[in-house]
Amino acid sequence: MKQENISILSPGERFEFKGFDWIVLDNNVDGGVLAIMTSTWNGEEYSFDDDGCNNYAKSSLRRKLLNELLPVLGEDNLIPHEVDMVADNGDDRYGTVTDRVFILSCDEYRKYRKHVPLLPEWMWTCTPWYISDSGIGYIVRIVSTGGCLNNYGAYFSHRVAPACVFNPKNLKLHRQVKMVEVKGEDY
């Protein structure tokens, strides 16, 4: 069995890690390999936020990813990634968070759209539609089954396709090389 650095994978290539299938979006992000799950996490729906807030930094979905999925994947296997929560209209008051497991922003979805799998269900992004001065911001951007960006209330439930930046220093690909005998030819 041959071991190779995970960073040799090209965008669009798939691999399995910790029982989940992943697809590479970029093999050079934050010094690692940015990948997204090829299907929804646990096949379940999650609200973006149980209280209906569209601020990903404070969302129940982010807490769930960090508390439930991160321990399964292992912190040492992942590189921290800055998640930009700029609103669809450019308002950047929510700022950024740095996480090892996260969901894509609309800008990341647009950048990597060619390789982001279209799921049979709508999936969350971390991008708020707008940030309200009155504190009533509850609309979040989602990706439809056809790949269009839409808006939905944070208190509703949709699917989640987590993303991570995999650490190439800690993860190696294991590929089997199969030898094939060719008869009748001298090489």
Image (cartoon, helix red, strand yellow):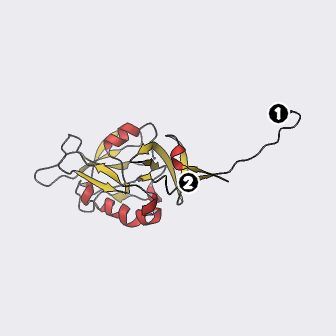
| Residue 150 at x, y percent in the picture | 31, 42
Q: Is residue 175 left or right of residue 184?
A: left
| Residue 90 at x, y percent in the picture | 20, 40
Type of residue at label 2? Lys
The residue identified by callout 2 is 172
The residue identified by callout 1 is 187
Nearest to the observer: residue 8 or residue 73: 8
Type of residue at label 1? Tyr
Q: Is residue 31 left or right of residue 3?
A: left
Nearest to the observer: residue 60 or residue 174: 174
Q: Residue at x 23, y 62 (%)?
A: 51
Q: Which mark is first along the chain, 1 or 2?
A: 2
| Residue 54 at x, y percent in the picture | 24, 53
* Residue projecting furthest to the left: 134
Rendered view: 26 above or below 22: above
Q: Residue at x 18, y 43 (%)?
A: 91
SS type, badge 2: strand
Q: Is residue 18 left or right of residue 148?
A: right
For the C terminus, the quadrant is: top right
Q: How many marks?
A: 2
Nearest to the observer: residue 113 or residue 170: 170
